[in-house]
């Protein structure tokens, strides 16, 4: 079912206002942000913990999807199939909010076609200005960010084989057990180490191989080990 924003009338004509989708697990924050956008920007909002591609009528203005990146817990978003599509051809404007000072994340967002980034230090009036700019077809990145993206070459990617060599024997052993479906408690009992130690190892492993959860870790093992 197509979803439209509120309609306003001007000079006897009705125009459709674009819709803002707020995606993230923090319900109270999302409700407060929705209230702000409705009251200050004049747009209706939808909220939800998970991303689903918004539907809208072909003649309607493309919606804006704001993806929560608080502590980068939900990233990499593109690993879940979230890619920006051309708003002129049935896509939506995508932007990240609650972004920390992570240049790698900002660069990745730009390369993936995200229309803008809202940092966690930005005041609400600036966010409102950015939302209006994106819905007008503009990009919302700082001049410094755009210059860096255009002029600085990307660093050489780290090969999975190189990453695998950085794992200690204990980390490799725990990673293989994760891939086999063992729980933290089972790993601790089998290896005669504390549960806290297991959790510390898993944190370091996930950071090294750049995965957010056990499923992605298991997929990484299947592909590279």
Image: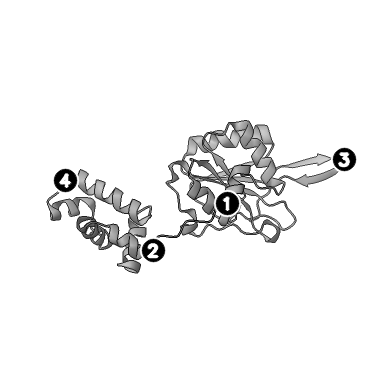
Q: Residue furthest left?
A: 192
- Left or right of 146 in this view: 102: left
Alpha-carbon span between mark 4 and mark 1: 44 Å
Q: Quadrant of residue 97?
A: top right
Observer able to see residue 175: yes
Q: For numbered disc 2, what is the local secondary structure?
A: loop
Q: Nearer the viewer, mark 4 or mark 1?
A: 1
Alpha-carbon span between mark 2 and mark 3: 60 Å
Residue 11 disc label: 3
Alpha-carbon span between mark 3 and mark 1: 44 Å
Q: Which residue is mark 4?
A: 194
Alpha-carbon span between mark 2 and mark 1: 22 Å
For image coordinates 35% across by 53% down, the residue present is 213
Q: For numbered disc 3, what is the local secondary structure?
A: loop
For image coordinates 71% across by 49% down, the residue present is 137
In which quadrant will I find the C terminus? bottom left
Alpha-carbon span between mark 3 and mark 4: 71 Å
Alpha-carbon span between mark 2 and mark 4: 32 Å
Q: Answer with mark 2 or mark 4, whichever residue precedes in sequence.
A: 2
Q: Which residue is mark 1?
A: 149
**Marks 1 and 3: in contact by CB < 8 Å?**
no
Q: Answer with mark 2 or mark 1, whichever residue precedes in sequence.
A: 1
The residue lying toward the viewer, choosing from 33 and 194, is 194
Q: Which residue is mark 2?
A: 159
Q: Nearer the viewer, mark 3 or mark 1?
A: 1
- Estimate how packed mark 1 is, as few (under 14), some (14 to 19) or many (20 or more) residues with alpha carbons within 10 Å: some
Residue 28 disc label: none
The residue lying toward the viewer, choosing from 147 and 175, is 147
Estimate the x, y position of residue 70 in percent, counting from the top left: 46, 41
């Amino acid at each position: 079912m197509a979803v439209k924003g509120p309609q306003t009338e001007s000079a006897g004509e009705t125009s459709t206002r674009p819709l803002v989708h707020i995606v993230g697990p923090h319900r109270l924050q999302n409700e407060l942000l929705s209230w702000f956008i409705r009251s200050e920007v004049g747009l209706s909002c939808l909220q939800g913990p998970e991303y689903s591609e918004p539907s809208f009528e072909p003649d309607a203005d493309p919606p804006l999807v704001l993806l929560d990146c608080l502590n980068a817990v939900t990233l990499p978003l593109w690993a879940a199939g979230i890619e920006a599509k051309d708003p002129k051809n049935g896509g939506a404007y995508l932007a990240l909010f609650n972004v920390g000072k992570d240049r790698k994340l900002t660069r990745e967002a730009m390369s993936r076609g995200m229309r803008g980034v809202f940092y966690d230090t930005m005041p609400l009036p600036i966010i409102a200005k950015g939302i209006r700019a994106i819905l007008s077809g503009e990009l919302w990145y700082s001049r410094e960010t755009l210059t860096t993206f255009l002029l600085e070459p990307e660093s050489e990617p780290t090969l999975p084989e190189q990453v695998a060599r950085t794992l200690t024997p204990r980390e490799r052993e725990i990673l293989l057990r994760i891939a086999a479906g063992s729980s933290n408690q089972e790993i601790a009992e089998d290896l005669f180490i504390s549960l806290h130690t297991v959790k510390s190892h898993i944190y370091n492993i996930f950071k090294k191989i750049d995965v957010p959860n056990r499923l992605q870790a298991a997929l990484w093992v299947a592909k590279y080990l």
